[in-house]
Amino acid sequence: MNPYILAILLFGLGLGTTITFASSHWLLAWMGLEMNTLAIIPLMAQHHHPRAVEATTKYFLTQATAAAMLLFASVTNAWLSGQWDIQQMTHPLPITIITLALALKIGLAPVHAWLPEVLQGLDLTVGLILSTWQKLAPFTLILQINPTNSTILIILGLTSTLIGGWGGLNQTQLRKILAYSSIAHLGWMILVLQFSPSLTLLTLLTYFVMTFSTFLVFKLNKATTINTLATSWTKAPLLTSLTPLILLSLGGLPPLTGFMPKWLILQELAKQDLALTATVAALSALLSLYFYLRLSYAMTLTMSPNNLSGTTPWRLSSTQLTLPLAISTTMAICLLPLTPAATALLAP
C-alpha cells in the first residue's frame, strides 16, 4: 500500500477514536465510531484475498448495524428526555439499546459471532489493530454511560467469559483462538464495569499489552496455525521459551501480569456479594487456560516431525523490529509486583 495512503488511513483511525474520546454529544461520538470503521476497512481489504474481502464485508455490516442501533437509541433518548448529552442518559430503554450496540461493536457474547470469522480473514498486523485499538472508542462510551442496568452487564460478562472459553477449545487457527481469548477478556472487563470502572480500564490495558505481545510473536514466526508454532524453535529458540509465559499470562496464572486484573476483579465481585458470578468467571478462566496450555505445549514440548511435509519451511530472517516485542513481552510477564501501586491508583 502507498505509504501516503497508509498514513492517511492511520491518521483517520486515530482521529476517529480521539473524536469519540472527546465527545459529549451522541452525534459526535457516532461520527467518531464511523470514521474508525471507514478508516480500517481499506487496511483490512488491502491484500485483495477473497478471505480478506469476505472478512471486511462481514466487519462492515456488523459495525454499520451497531452504529445504526447507536444512532437510533440516541435519537430515542433525545425524543424521550430532550438530551443529547452522553452523561445524561436517564431512560432505561435507550441505555439498554446502546449497551447492546456497543457490545456488538466490540464483539461481546452473545453478539460475538462475527469476531472470530473476521479476525481469521485478516493478516496479523490488522488483526492486532482490530483486537486492541478498535476496542478503545466503544469502551470509552460504555464507561461514560455507566449502564444502570446491572443484570444485562452481568449476563453479557458471564456469557462472554464462558463462550470465550468454550469457543477456543477446538480451534487450530491461532487468529480464531486469539479472537475467543479477546471475547473472554472483554467479558471480565464488563463484569466489573459497574462496580469499579477504573479496574475495567486496568484490565483493558493489561489485555492490550499481552495481546500486543502475542500477536508480535506470531507475526515474527509467520504462524497462523498451531502446527506452524511447532517449527518456531529452530527460528527463535529464546523467544520460543518465553512465549509460553506470555500465553499463561493471558490465561491469568500467577506470578505473571495477567493474574493481577483477574485477582482484583474476583476480589471486587466477592465484595459486592456476587460469589456465584465470581465462581463461574473463575471456572471459565480454566477453559481459556486449557487452550493457552495447548499452544504452549505445541510450541515448546513437541518436536516438529522430520518428514518432508513437517520440516521447517525455508525463510528469510524477519525484518520485524524486535524492540516493541521485547518491551511488551517484559511487561506481559513481569508487572505483577506493581499490583499495590495499581490498587493505590484505583482507589477513589
Image: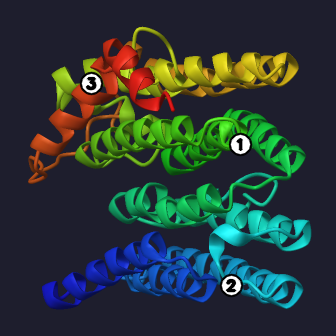
User: What distance separates the C-alpha of mark 1 from that of mark 2?
Assistant: 22 Å
Upstream in sequence: badge 1 or badge 3: 1
Can residue 303 be seen?
no
User: What distance separates the C-alpha of mark 2 from that of mark 3?
Assistant: 52 Å
Mark 1 lies on residue: 194
Scheme of colours in the image: rainbow
Q: Residues within 10 Å of mark 3 (few under 14, many from 20)?
A: many
SS type, badge 2: loop
Residue 262: image location, x then y, percent: 57, 23
Q: Are marks 1 and 2 in contact (CB under 8 Å)?
A: no
SS type, badge 3: helix
Q: Residue at x 62, y 25 (%)?
A: 265
Upstream in sequence: badge 1 or badge 2: 2
Can residue 321 be seen?
yes
Q: Is residue 66 left or right of residue 259?
A: right
Mark 2 lies on residue: 84
Residue 269: image location, x then y, percent: 73, 23
Q: Is residue 127 left or right of residue 55?
A: left
Mark 1 or 2: the one toward you: 2
User: What distance separates the C-alpha of mark 1 from that of mark 3?
Assistant: 39 Å
Amino acid at circle 2: Trp
State the mark number for residue 240: 3
Upstream in sequence: badge 2 or badge 3: 2
Q: Are marks 1 and 3 in contact (CB under 8 Å)?
A: no
Q: Residue at x 60, y 89 (%)?
A: 27
Q: Which of these two is toward me, 165 or 348?
A: 348
